[in-house]
Image (cartoon, rainbow, N blue to C red):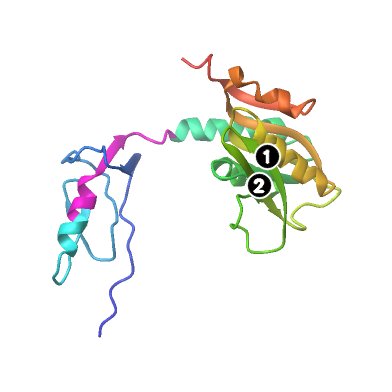
Amino acid sequence: MTAPPSPRLLPTPRRCCRAGAGASARAPAASSSSVLLGSLGRKRSGAVVMAAAGGDFDARVARIASTIRVIPDFPKPEAFRETIDIFVERYKAKGITVVAGVEARGFIFGPTIALALGAKFVPLRKPKKLPGEVISEEYSLEYGTDKIKMHVGAVEPDDRAVVVDDLIATGGTLCAAVKLIERAGAEVVECACVIELSELKGRDKLGNKPVFVLVKADEAG
């Protein structure tokens, strides 16, 4: 039996494709964006519909493709680059050795910032995600509690860390992240977020720990 060809990523210049039940069934015919749905594909209405040897595979993939809509010019590459640049400019002279990213959107910003600073990136993850020995910190939610975890040895007592997330709301996750890193003996220099929902007073949970944000939601027009 001949093995199928390896998956091939089709070009997606400045496009974002999202699948969901409420998505439009039609994609722009002239779209330069494609979605790879398998290893053998043909383009159909802006998406890739899989060729199959029989059965209902085609019909199922066609239904999946019909839920995908194209959002032009998203994500905004200029905004992401400028966001990273601002954080890097702020921390490049502060001796940062660890950039800790809070799951999940902290993983988008954290590694790029860490790379630019020459620091190590440490993921702070939800339960059952990290394979090695971990330490954890519990925090409160509106409907109960959750935990955030970090690998043992990921940070060391002489590390200087910045904790990165996309958003500060009630502050529970960031507070747990700070406690987790400080329990390992490292210093948390600051928390850095792109957006703050200031009406939720998340800063209050962090006490005197500095929080740097780019945009307050009530000021974003």
Q: Residues within 10 Å of mark 1 (few under 14, many from 20)?
A: some
Instruction: Kindly indicate whether the residue at mark 1 contacts the one at mark 2 (C-beta within 8 angstroms).
Output: yes
Label 1 secondary element: strand
Q: Residues within 10 Å of mark 2 (few under 14, many from 20)?
A: many
Label 2 secondary element: strand
Q: Quadrant of residue 26?
A: top left
Do we see residue 163 in this rendering? yes
* Mark closer to the observer (2, 1): 1
Residue placed farthest to the front in the image?
144
Give me the C-alpha separation between circle 2 and circle 1: 8 Å
Of residues 29 and 177, which is closer to you in this image?
A: 177
Q: Any mark on residue 63, and which?
A: none
Residues rendered magenta in the picture: 62-76
Which image quadrant: the N terminus?
Answer: bottom left
Q: Residue at x 49, y 30 (%)?
A: 79
- The residue that mark 1 highlights is 139
As drawn, is 3 to the left or to the right of 201? left
Q: Quadrant of residue 31?
A: top left
Q: Residue at x 33, y 42 (%)?
A: 18
Residue 138 is situated, as x and y percent measured from the top left of the image, at: 69, 44
Q: Residue at x 28, y 62 (%)?
A: 38
Residue 157 is situated, as x and y percent measured from the top left of the image, at: 86, 49
Q: Amino acid at mark 1?
A: Tyr
- The residue that mark 2 highlights is 148
Q: Amino acid at mark 2?
A: Ile
Of residues 75 and 88, which is closer to you in this image?
A: 75
What is the total number of numbered labels drawn onto the structure image?
Answer: 2
Mark closer to the chain start, 2 or 1: 1
